[in-house]
Amino acid sequence: MDRFDYVVVGGGSSGCVVAGKLAEDPSVRVLLLECGDRGEDNPETLVADGYKDAFVNDRVIWERFSVPQTGCAGRRVFMGSGRGMGGSGAVNAMVYTRGDALDFETWGKGWRWGDIAPDFDALEAELKVNRRPPTDFTDHCIRAAEAAGMRHLRDLNTGDLHDVLGYEWMSYEGQERRSAYVAFVRPKQQQDNLVVQTGARAKRVLIERGTATGVVYEVDGREVTARAGREVVLCAGALETPKLLMLSGVGPGHHLREHGIQVAVDAPVGDNFHDHPNIQLFFRGKRTVDANYPQLYGFGRVGASEQLESPTQPDACFVFYPARSSFREGLIRMLPAIAFPPSLYFAQDKLGPRLIRAGVERAFDRLAVQRFVARMWGIVVILGKPKSRGTVRLASRRAEDDMLIDPAYFDHPDDLATVRAGVERARAIAAQRPLAMWGNRELLPGGLVRGAAVEGFIKSNVMTTYHYAGTCRMGDGPDAVVDRQLRVRGVNGLRVADASVMPVAPVAALNAPSMLIGWRAAAMMKATAATMAAQ
């Protein structure tokens, strides 16, 4: 048994911020538990150009599938996420977007734009985000979007994302990826008061007489108990955090009893699950695309106005994607997930997936394929404000078993209508003269796919953007799992600090807001400790 002041579960974007900031106080001991590898074991997660290689490294990707999606032609959708130090922030395309100011109105008192903007500023001072320089291709995209009615905005982090596009802030500096691990944990790993334990699978939170007192985890085949003198904070993400809470007895009472788990707190853990589904349009240019990153992003309002704060609040995101940046790696990762049901995908020898991957690699050895892809570009249409809500539930009481993931894509009919409107907006941008000059022959879905056929294309091809949120909702009412101080209701000494607390996800990528949540959680925990010390 080990004793610490704080035990942090999850070495991803939020968990690294929490642990790093808490460890600034040399008088406290912090344990950071991560199920995956050290960052140094997978060096592609530490360099800016390594993101595409990380995406195909099975050691740094949790491979999961949803339950069959009625709104997606009955498909099981791949629902992966990052694992290892840095989490998804160590394998993504380094996008760093705060979101629109109106996104945070639903987060409530203390979490609105005016409350959090100073914390974003402080976070970014340590993270050191940057932008990629313009290219000829991105310049043509900007001029085409402007011709279609959008505004070119120099800074996408001002809180105004209404019908704008610009160069995305990205978590890198020079040749280094600036993940939360690189920025907040790696510089402190030599400190005696910060212990980082990788290869550690959290099994349950110890809850004794209504107080979280530690975490039971497994490492190298043995079970270890880490005691927390002050607090336990869960930062394992919107899929793993609710699973761990339910395994610990905090969740829907009837569901826990079905699995023989004693109920400590009957709470709506795992409800309110939502994600940003996306659909990709591809075009063929007349010349090689001179961009190596998806660095140009646009935002706009394309759907109905109900349930949003304002008619100008954006509900869709548009990513201008150079295929040469990671199309090969995307096929290596996604084609096996599309071709095989989970039972075959996870077969012991994984022969089918390995054959498909090898086939993609051989195809890309051909110069003709390389030249074709070098001229391909796309617009990724992302549903930024989904109305559908799904669930995360236990499949068993075993920590090593995956959960049942139901994003309920297109359960609300407005979501499909909004994505369809987004496809038409993307086509309108691609049709403008600057991109017509560049070359805009539509490859996917193809010029003949029009009208109702567009919806069929969307249902058959939609995929996750890996932006999972909402499963431990923050708020004041009975549907809230944590309060606005991120404390789990009904359990003392236990907080949640990751994307699962978001009542409603921002329209943008969730990496920046997740780090913000970690930043604020650490400050709250420090304030609580100071108050208790003064009593």
Image: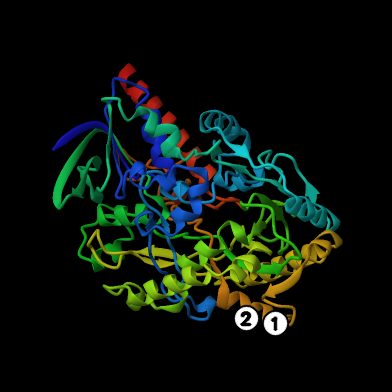
Residue 213: x and y in percent read 22, 39
In-front residue for pair 520/145: 145
In this figure, which residue is indicated by the disc labeled 1? 452
Which residue is drawn at the image coordinates 56% and 36% (left, top)?
174
Q: Residue furthest top?
A: 534
Residue 57 higher or lower than 28, as above or below: below
Q: Secondary structure at mark 2?
A: helix
Q: Residues within 10 Å of mark 2 (few under 14, many from 20)?
A: few
In this figure, which residue is indicated by the disc labeled 2? 456
Which residue is drawn at the image coordinates 65% and 62% (left, top)?
374
- Label 2 is placed on what type of residue? Gly
Residue 381 higher or lower than 523, as above or below: below
- Label 1 is placed on what type of residue? Ala
Image quadrant holding the N terminus, namely: top left
One can see residue 267 in this view? no
| 152 lies left or right of 380 | right
| 444 lies left or right of 435 | left
Dot label at residue 516: none
Question: Gap in Å between the C-alphas at discs 2 and 1?
Answer: 7 Å
Residue 279: x and y in percent read 61, 68
Q: Residue furthest front?
A: 367
Image quadrant holding the C terminus, namely: top left
Q: Secondary structure at mark 1?
A: helix
